[in-house]
Image (cartoon, grey):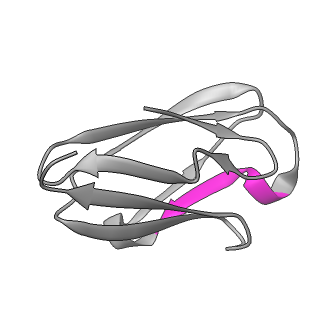
Amino acid sequence: MRVEVKGGYTPSVVRVRAGVPVRLEFHRDETNTCTEEVVLPDFGIRTFLPAHRTTPVSFTPAEGTYEFTCGMGMVRGKIVAERKV
């Protein structure tokens, strides 16, 4: 699933299936330094997002809700992992 990064995350809520590997593709379409990183703390992921490029991030969520943020924690999104999507 593709997540656009430009002043925020679009979509800001991503629904996925619990227990199944997920690959989010963050496409950063700006040079604002605030969004140059994406952090998924529950998965120990902190990834640099080059401007005007797409960067994949992979993980396998258990059922639940997980937050993802920019490196400064100001821009936020969430992942909702459900048994049935």
Taking 23 as reference, is 38 above or below it?
A: below
Q: Is residue 16 above or below residue 69?
A: above
Magenta highlight range:
34-40
Is residue 68 shown left or right of residue 43?
A: right
21 sits left or right of 5 in the view: left
Q: Position of residue 23 (x, y in %)?
A: 34, 36
Instruction: Determine the residue located farthest toward the top in the rendered image.
Output: 53
Residue at 20% in and 42% down: 21
Identified at 65% across, 49% down, the residue is 9
Front-lying residue, 77 or 52: 77
Farthest front residue in view: 84
In this rendering, position of residue 58 left or right of residue 47 = left
Q: Position of residue 67 (x, y in %)?
A: 47, 68
35 in the magenta segment? yes
Quarter that holds the N terminus: top left
- Image quadrant holding the C terminus, namely top left
Query: Residue 64: x and y, percent?
Result: 25, 70
* Front residue of 25 and 1: 1
Tag count? 0
Quarter of the image for residue 29 reads: top right
Res 59 visible: no
Q: Position of residue 7 (x, y in %)?
A: 82, 50
Q: Residue at x 21, y 51 (%)?
A: 60
Give the residue at x 29% y 47%.
16
